[in-house]
Image (cartoon, coloured by chain):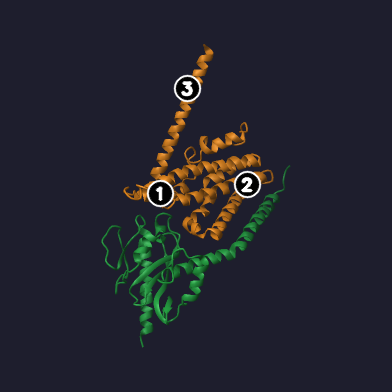
Chain colours: A green, B orange
Amino acid sequence: MRRQRWFATVYMFVVMMAFSSVVIGLARYTDERVEANQALAFERAVVRVLPGVYEEGLSGLEIHRRFVEQVDEPTEATAGAYSHKSNGVVQTYALPFEGQGFWATIKGIIGIKADRETVTAISFYEQNETPGLGARITEPEFRDQFEGKVLAADGKTLTFRRPGETLTPSQVHAVTGATQTSVRLEKIVNDAVAQWREQLSGESRP
Amino acid sequence: MNGMGKPKPIKALMVDGLWDNNPIFQQVLGICSTLAVTNLVLNTVVMCAGLVFTLSLSALSVSILRSLTPRNVRMMVETLIIAFYVIIVDIMLKAYWPAMSDNLGPYVGLIITNCIVMGRCEACANSNPPLKAMVDGCFNALGYSFILLIIAVFREVMGMGTFLGLDVPYFSTHWDKWIIMVMPPGAFFMLAVVIWVMRSIQMGREAKQKNSAAGGKQEKSQ
């Protein structure tokens, strides 16, 4: 059977409409869930850097409850950082940072004690680095190094050194085999901390 | 299996996909993802499951629509169908397994560009009934998967000393981890070794078959 010339166009249009409709329907059906997952990933990252608030093995619901009850939203006084207070006094800041990684944007949180110098932890809620290489920044082996580190007063607040090198209190080891991710993450974290400190010193000026 | 010769039985299609015409070590297709996702076994398993789902159902859909689809737009339709199933995998991972979705990053979306999927749609699904097309797609994806898993197991164990994220005795403690195995060059080395071993096995089998066939002929002539 010889088909009319317009058949291919109409056929393509109908097939596209049919498949697109299913995809749009499924995306709408899961939309709320995807958004909730993204929100929970952020809340988990914030809570994770707050000592006394986070514990291993908490359910998603419990993480959300603790975030709502124990974490204060950013204010001018905290220069954009989330905070955890005890008796009205800030115990820990949770400073969000983001910037271009090797493949895509890396978004995370760095926890800093009320002394504004001691790091409590680092966590990530969005990254698309190479699985098994750059993506290892999310693994405890890398993250755990940050606990107790001291932000240097000037220059680079935190420096990433080659694996195996001896470290000072302001240095951590980079991820083996992921030089680009490490270099970019170092810059992202340092820029965010420097900007935060600048804003805080501006706030505290008369 | 191009629809030109004698149609193959379903069992032959299965053996073809898994071994005789294996997409990785015989056709050397889909190498990008073979190199990219095989540094962790869990990522590889999920990637392979995504490909089995996409390839089986893409082949089935292409085959069902084959008599309606005009020749001049068939590749556009195939791409659309493949993208449709890949997006479904992506949405499901984002909604129900966000951690894995984060781990795999852009690679799930890149199934669309996997040569094996389009290759099987063009070579088989376009000219065969739905069941055969689906079996062909499924077993090609399984053939791809088992090679990827072999590569992934070696890379993760030798590179990180773990298997599915769990410490492997000796490799996690005494083994001096070969970091290069989890880096891109390690994937090239492993892929070359696997292709070499598999093809050697295949050549051995073929030589054996030839010998037995030649022996049979000699017996007959006597």
Residue B21 on image: x %, y %: 52, 36
Give the chain letter at badge 3.
B
Please, what is the three-letter code of the amino acid marked with disc 3? Asn
> Image quarter for residue A159?
bottom left
Viewer can see residue A4: yes
Q: State the mark number for residue B211.
A: 3
Please, what is the three-letter code of the amino acid marked with disc 1? Glu
Q: Quadrant of the N terminus of chain A?
A: top right
Viewer can see residue B29: no
Vertical side of A150 occupied by B93: above or below: above
Residue A17 on image: x %, y %: 66, 56
What secondary structure is found at the residue carrying circle 2? helix
- Give whichever of discs 2 and 1 has the lower sequence position: 2
- Give whichever of discs 1 and 3 has the lower sequence position: 1
What secondary structure is found at the residue carrying circle 3? helix
> Image quarter for residue A98?
bottom left
Graded by Cα atoms within 10 Å as few (under 14), some (14 to 19) or many (20 or more), the crowding at tag 2 reads many
| Between A159 and A167, the one nearer to me in the picture | A167
Q: Quadrant of the C terminus of chain A?
A: bottom left
